[in-house]
Image: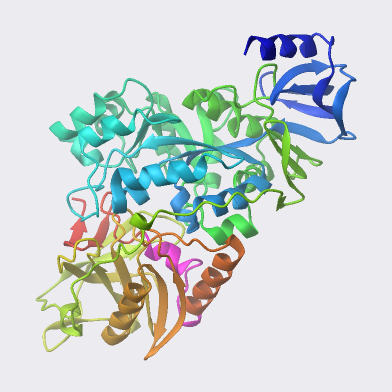
Amino acid sequence: MVERWRRFLAVAQQRESADLLWRNARLVNVASGEIERVNVAVCDGLVAGIGDYTEAEQIVDLAGDYLAPSFIDGHVHVESSLIWVDQFARAVVPHGTGAVVTDPHEIANVAGLDGIRALMDAGRPQPLDFYFTIPSCVPASDRESSGAVMTTEVISEALTLPNVVGLGEMMNFPGVLNGDESIYDKLQLLVGRRDGHAPGLRGPALNAYAGSGMTSDHESTELEEAREKLRRGMMLMIREGSTEHNLLELLPLVDDRTYPRCCFASDDRDCATLLNDGHVDAILRKAIGAGLDPIRAIRMATLATAEYWRLPRTGQIAPGFRANAVVFSDLSDIRPRAVYFNGRVVAEDGRALFDVPATAPDGLLHSVNITPFDVDRLRPVVEGRMVAVGAIPGQIVTRKLEVEPKTTDGRLTSDVDRDLLKLVVVERHHATGRIGVGLVEGFGLKQGALASSIAHDAHNIVAVGVDDFEILRAIQAVVRMQGGLAAVRGRDVLAELALPIAGILSPEPLEDVTEHYEKLEAVARSLGSSVPSPFGLLSFMALSVIPAARVTDQGIVTFD
């Protein structure tokens, strides 16, 4: 080790040649907020020096292109991409991503600590840094049923694993506010970063939540909500995902005083969005296009995130920092031309230059277990008015509606004319036979049914549809695939995508999964759905910790 250090010192002092030299670079200096016209020397995967270096084994002339630190996603669920870890890396690295801070609570809800370890093992050899927060709420609440439980003891063990940087999002904010002892015990496990998750929380309730030790939040959907969280000391993560679009609403908050306490998070980006639109680079393009200073935007996507999460030697191009960098030609329209990881080029012109296969362990397969049922289970008896879920395209929050339901012989029926469709959630981990049935407004289906085993966060089977028999067929298709997505009309399965890894991920190549996913979304829209991403919206309809109404396997959930 001392010899490597001495060589680094020699390269830095121009007494020896570097391994790599980026020549004629316009360096985006996120520490000083300026553009420097320099050469950058790299030794053993680290930046050795910045200045007038000339000697190296490999010289790359950037010819005036910009050189910036590779981008960091401050909060993401890798599993929401629908693809296994090796394919996720192939999806995001060409877009300039060098690190992600991921909360693996999706796979933890299915497989607990075994699922987390599998994700970590698959990520380790990839040319992408995976940092982890350990899920704090599995299940998210006692109003939904997960496949595993992350107890205080399990969380304590998980916090000792490599590359763990904090406690995952504390989704059960009602439990925090009510002084739940089990939550208190979890918060005592870590003195450090505790990721928050407090949609809509304001005033004294926010004081109590932040004061319990939560240090960040990515759930703000309104400007004043975000401003209050920032004022109360929380790191503001501005979210822009596939379904959740909060960037333009919150961007006015970023100014000369606030920007050091702001960063970006994708939270949930599916494979199609990653392949066609991009990752953090797409968020940067949108933010810069909306008027945010480019250097400030890049700092929020690099140094601000790295400093918040305390990521070692990451987040800027500076001596001693990892040579993880992205090259692009236009500061106002960032499109990575080359991506480097530890000084090695890993992507060029949107194409990954690596293929590091990672297989999922057998223990994550065959996770869909249900008790067989017939269509009568989807037809509960109802009397009088009932609560329905009001879906909001582009948001994961919902509205709580009071409706007079349509019935046939006293049993609940979809009402296409009012866009009140049957919403069904089937417990799929332990074959308990629990089925929740309600109504949802906002999908716009005129015929057919959609079903998915992607149902944040417990990942039971969720379905929406016009006809009960079609709903049942769609659910049966998901079970047959041991997890996945299905669109049905009449007796026909029009499109499907198998997700056999924990019922939420595909082992297939990024491009193939994207093709099937895009077909499913197109079929859903052909059935009348008016929302941009019907399956994306469906995946959040059972999330029991986001206001204002949901349906889980335990029935209708409301926030009063």
As drawn, is 194 to the left or to the right of 125? left
Query: Is residue 537 a member of the stretch shown in magenta?
Result: yes
Q: Is residue 6 above or below residue 465?
A: above
Q: Is residue 349 above or below residue 522?
A: above
Residue at (49, 66) in percent of width and height: 533
- List x then y, in percent, for residue 247: 54, 45
- List x then y, in percent, for residue 453: 35, 65
- Quarter holding the N terminus is top right
In the depicted view, which residue is nearer to us: 371 or 292?
Answer: 371
As drawn, is 378 to the left or to the right of 361? left
Residue at (31, 27) in percent of width and height: 210
- List x then y, in percent, for residue 549: 25, 58
The single residue placed furthest to the bottom in the displayed view is: 491
In the depicted view, which residue is nearer to us: 50 or 547?
Answer: 50
Query: Is residue 527 something that shows in the picture?
Result: yes
In the depicted view, which residue is nearer to us: 193 or 386?
Answer: 193
As drawn, is 273 to the left or to the right of 390? right
Residue range (magenta): 526-539
Residue 296 occupies which quadrant of the picture?
top right
